[in-house]
Amino acid sequence: MNSVRVVGLGPGEKAYILPAAIEAIQKADILIGAQRHLDAFSEYGKQTFCIAHRFEQMIGFIKEKANKQNIAVVVSGDTGFYSLLRYLKSNLPDQEFDVIPGISSITLMFARLGFMYDDAFTTSMHGKELDVARIVREYKKVGLLTDGKATPAAIAQKLESAGVKGKLMAIGERLSYADEKISKLTPEQAKKYEADLLSVVVIYDEDIRV
Ligand SMILES: C[S@@+](CC[C@H](N)C(=O)[O-])C[C@H]1O[C@@H](n2cnc3c(N)ncnc32)[C@H](O)[C@@H]1O
């Protein structure tokens, strides 16, 4: 059985993709991923499977094809940070995987701010009810993946309602792309801010330097 490659594509722009990831994509017969990612590699003319929430079909497709063809599943950011890797390994217990990491959107955001993240709390807001106010009181830096419900504005509103003081919110939109935007706002400003759907947030003590 061929190993299925799971390939981290970084935040989006090709300059932030590892050469090893490009090589894995070039060698693959079939690319599986979100449409945004498949489109980025259309020049290679590979057979593709667009996931579009069809997770069970994707598992069936991999079971059917992995014996005969080389499959690369492409995921955004890093493979080890809220990627499909967990789902793939749970649902394909007998399958071998070869994992090629990428730069996480959170890693890039901390770099943009010039901050370390080894002392930060990082998580994803996707489909979770998180007590953000409690977490930001506990940690000097908190990095969050956002989604259409837990937007930067909704997070800011929670902080304000809980009376959190002395924090700034950095919002990173469309990181690595030409129209990337980084905004450093107070929660009061951020609660009115309409961010792009592709955003991460870092909430930090206003006096930290690194
Ligand atoms: C399913 S998670 C995948 C996270 C990914 N594994 C990583 O390491 O960045 C998708 C979330 O990542 C964040 N994200 C991914 N690419 C981004 C980018 N270019 N700019 C800002 N946020 C991004 C957004 O919060 C998005 O909702």
Image: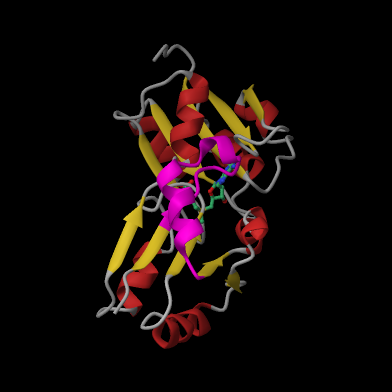
- Residue 18 appears left or right of 197: left
* Residue drawn where x is 50% and y is 40% of the image: 105
Residue 102 seen by the camera = no
Q: Which residues are magenta?
A: 7-29
Q: Looking at the image, can residue 17 be seen?
A: yes
Q: State whether residue 209 is above or below residue 63.
A: above
Report the number of numbered marks: 0
Residue 136 pos. (x, y %)? 42, 33
Q: In screen coordinates, is 77 left or right of 197?
A: left
> Could you tell whether 198 is left or right of 10 in the image?
right
Q: Position of residue 138 (x, y in %)?
A: 33, 32
Task: Identify which residue, 60 or 125, lies in the foreground.
Answer: 60
From this view, report whether residue 67 is shown above or below residue 25: below
- 143 vs 160, nearest the viewer: 143
**Residue toward you, 194 or 17:** 17
Q: Does residue 60 show up magenta in the picture?
A: no
Relative vertical location of residue 182 with respect to residue 121 in this rendering, above or below? above
